[in-house]
Amino acid sequence: NNFMNSEYINIYNNLVNLSRNKNLFFNFTEKDTFSDRLLIFFFHLAFFFKYFKSKIDQKYMQNFYDYVFRQIELDIREIGYGDQTVNKKMKTYVNLLYSIINKFENWEKSNFDEKNTVLKSFIEINDNNENFVDYFIKYTKYLSKTSLNSFTKSVINHKF
């Protein structure tokens, strides 16, 4: 279904756009590597799933999830990895996303330091970097008040 596909593309591109926020990279690392970008994307994606899974039917979410991993696989192939490496990396990435989703389960109940610890368990954040944690606190508040529609139309600048 083309309509659905364009919605998935738009959601994906919105999340990628958020993940490319230069301030996020400036705030936690000088490195802007594929794996760092992917982690930041997974943070956005994990929260996206967390806030929308109860509002959207499961088949839609599953199809979007499949779409995301097809895109990631294409990106890895573009970098030039062979089939075996791609398959290994894809398994690693799927497990990583599940691990992030699990750790984000109690996000709302966690205090600032606990949120910081959760994020730091996945990515190297510069010491005392409140901005990084603040960003995701604002992002999750934004998601809780936002409809899926604002992600499905086209890429917009989400303000939060």
Image (cartoon, grey):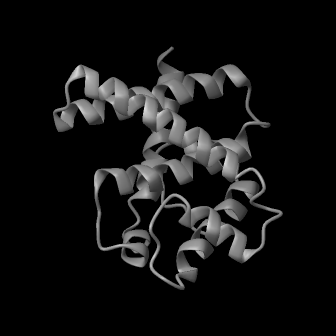
Query: Eyeballing the image, is 106 above or below 66?
Result: below
Q: Is residue 88 above or below residue 34?
A: above
Please state the total of marks drawn on the protein image. 0
The spot of residue 157 in percent (x, y) is 48, 61
Q: Nearer the viewer, residue 27 or 140?
A: 27
Is 142 drawn above or below residue 152 in the view shown? Answer: below
Res. 92 image quadrant: top left
Q: Residue furthest right?
A: 109
Is 154 or 118 nearer to us in this picture?
118
Q: Residue 132: give x, y in percent of width and height.
A: 53, 73
Residue at 71%, 45% in the rendered image: 50
Q: Where is 41 relative to 96, above or below?
A: below
Residue drawn at x 68%, y 60% is 140
Q: Residue at x 53, y 36 (%)?
A: 95
Identify which residue is drawn at 29% across, 63% down. 32
Query: In this orientation, does residue 155 appear?
Result: no
- Residue 71 at x, y percent in the picture: 37, 31
- Report whether 1 appears left or right of 112: left
The reply, left or right, for residue 104 in relation to residue 35 is right
Residue 150 at what x, y percent from top left? 60, 48
Does residue 81 appear to the left or right of 26 in the view shown? Answer: left
